[in-house]
C-alpha cells in the first residue's frame, strides 16, 4: 500500500470531494477516483458512496481514517525530515485569499523563485477555503480577528488599510478630517458598511459613519469602482498600492490610519496540524515575513 494513495484518501475524507482534491493536486478527478478504487480493492471494502454531486464516507472509511491519520502524518513528517536540505526542493502548496494573494503574495514570487530555483510553487487563491481544505496545503495565509489567531501560527502583522478615491471624484470634494467622510459616497463591503475608524498620529481614534449606494463583496471590484470615480473605497493597502503610485487613485486622509470599525484584523501564516513543519514551508514563512514589510501592507501591533 503506497503512502501517496493513503494521502489521497486522507484528503478526500477531509474535503469530501474528489473534484476539490483533484484541483488542489492539479490532476483530473478520474485520477483521484482510481486511487480510491485501488485502495478499496486492496481493503476489500467500500469506502465512499459516490453520486454525481456528493461523496459520502462509509462507516468503514471513518474507522479507517481515524486509525491511519496519525500514521500518515508521521510518515509524511519523517519523509520530509529526510528530504529537507539547505536548498529547498519540490513543491510548496500555498493557499491565500484572492485579493491578498494577488496583490501581496504574487509580487514576491519572482524573487522567491529566483532565490530557490529548485522550489516549485502551487498557489491556490480562494476566499472560501475551509479548515479541512487547509490541511491539504503546506502554508495558508489567513486574515482574521487577532484573537482568533492560533498559537501555532506565525503572526505577520496587523492589516493596513487605505481610504482612497480617484482624482476626478475628489475634484469636487473636500476631505480634510475624518468627519468629512460622512458626506462622501463610500464604496462599502457587507462587513464594513456601517462605520470606519480613523486614528491620528497621536493615537486618538474617531469612528465615523459612512454610507454609499454600492455594497460589494470583492476588494478587486471595489478597486475598479474607485478608479472609475464612483466614490471613496477602504481597501487593503497592498490592493491599492499600484493605483496610488500611478495616480489613478489618491489617498484620502493620509495622516490618519483608516480601518474598518470592529475587530482588529491580523494576517498570519498557518500550517496543517503536524509535529514537523517541512523545510519548504519554513523557508517560505521566513521569506514572506521578511519581505512583506517592504510593501507597507502590514503594521506591527502596538505593545501594551
Image: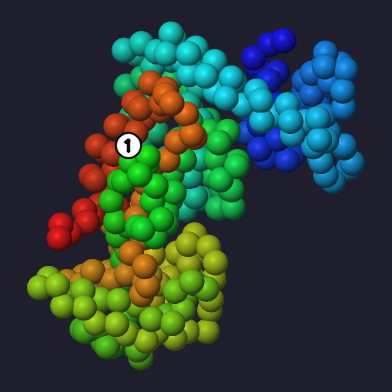
Compared with 187, 80 (above or below) is above
Residue 216 in which image quadrant? bottom right
Is residue 98 rendered to the left or right of residue 34?
left
Name the residue nearer the viewer: 133 or 190: 133
* Residue 215 at x, y percent in the picture: 53, 76
List x then y, in percent, for residue 145.
39, 60
In the displayed structure, would residue 262 be above or below residue 185?
Answer: above
The image quadrant where one finds the N terminus is: top right
Scheme by which the image is coloured: rainbow
Q: Which residue lies furthest to the left in this view?
A: 202
Q: Which residue is drawn at 85% across and 46% down?
A: 53
How far from the left and from the top, in percent, is residue 149? Answer: 38, 51
230 lies above or below 2: below
Q: Can residue 8 be seen in this view?
A: yes
Q: Residues within 10 Å of mark 1 (few under 14, many from 20)?
A: some
The residue to which callout 1 is attached is 288
Q: Which sits in the foreground, 295 or 25?
A: 25
> Height in image: 177 above or below 234?
below
- Image check: 143 left or right of 122? left
Residue 122's x, y, as percent? 53, 30
Residue at the image point whose x is 43% and y is 8% from the top: 82
Q: In which quarter of the image is the C terminus?
A: bottom left
Q: Is mark 1 on a helix, strand or loop?
A: helix
Which residue is located at x 48 percent, y 45 percent?
96
Question: Left or right: where does residue 21 sit relative to residue 210?
Answer: right
How many marks the image carries: the answer is 1
Amino acid at each position: 500500500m503506497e503512502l501517496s494513495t493513503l494521502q489521497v484518501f486522507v484528503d478526500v475524507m477531509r474535503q469530501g470531494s474528489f473534484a476539490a482534491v483533484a484541483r488542489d493536486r492539479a490532476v483530473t478527478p478520474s485520477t483521484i477516483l482510481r486511487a480510491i478504487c485501488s485502495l478499496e480493492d486492496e481493503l476489500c471494502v467500500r469506502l465512499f458512496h459516490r453520486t454525481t454531486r456528493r461523496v459520502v464516507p462509509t462507516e468503514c472509511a471513518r474507522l479507517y481514517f481515524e486509525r491511519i491519520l496519525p500514521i500518515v502524518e508521521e510518515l509524511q513528517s519523517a519523509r520530509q525530515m529526510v528530504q529537507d536540505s539547505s536548498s529547498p526542493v519540490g513543491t510548496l502548496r500555498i493557499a491565500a485569499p484572492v485579493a491578498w494573494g494577488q496583490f501581496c503574495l504574487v509580487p514576491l514570487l519572482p524573487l522567491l523563485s529566483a532565490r530557490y530555483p529548485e522550489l516549485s510553487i502551487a498557489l491556490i487563491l480562494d476566499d472560501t477555503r475551509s479548515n479541512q481544505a487547509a490541511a491539504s496545503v503546506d502554508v495558508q495565509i489567513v486574515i482574521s480577528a487577532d484573537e482568533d489567531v492560533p498559537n501555532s501560527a506565525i503572526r505577520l502583522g496587523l492589516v493596513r488599510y487605505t481610504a482612497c478615491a480617484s482624482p476626478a471624484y475628489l475634484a469636487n470634494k473636500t476631505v480634510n478630517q475624518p468627519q468629512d467622510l460622512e458626506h462622501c459616497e463610500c464604496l462599502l463591503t457587507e462587513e464594513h458598511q456601517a462605520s470606519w475608524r480613523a486614528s491620528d498620529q497621536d493615537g486618538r481614534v474617531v469612528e465615523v459613519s459612512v454610507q454609499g449606494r454600492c455594497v460589494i463583496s470583492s476588494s478587486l471590484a471595489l478597486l475598479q469602482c474607485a478608479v472609475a470615480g464612483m466614490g471613496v473605497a477602504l481597501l487593503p493597502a497592498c490592493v491599492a498600492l499600484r493605483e496610488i503610485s500611478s495616480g489613478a487613485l489618491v489617498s484620502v486622509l493620509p495622516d490618519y490610519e483608516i480601518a474598518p470599525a470592529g475587530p482588529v484584523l491580523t494576517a498570519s501564516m498557518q500550517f496543517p496540524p503536524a509535529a514537523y513543519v517541512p523545510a519548504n514551508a519554513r523557508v517560505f514563512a521566513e521569506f514572506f515575513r521578511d519581505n512583506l514589510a517592504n510593501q507597507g501592507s502590514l503594521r506591527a501591533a502596538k505593545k501594551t
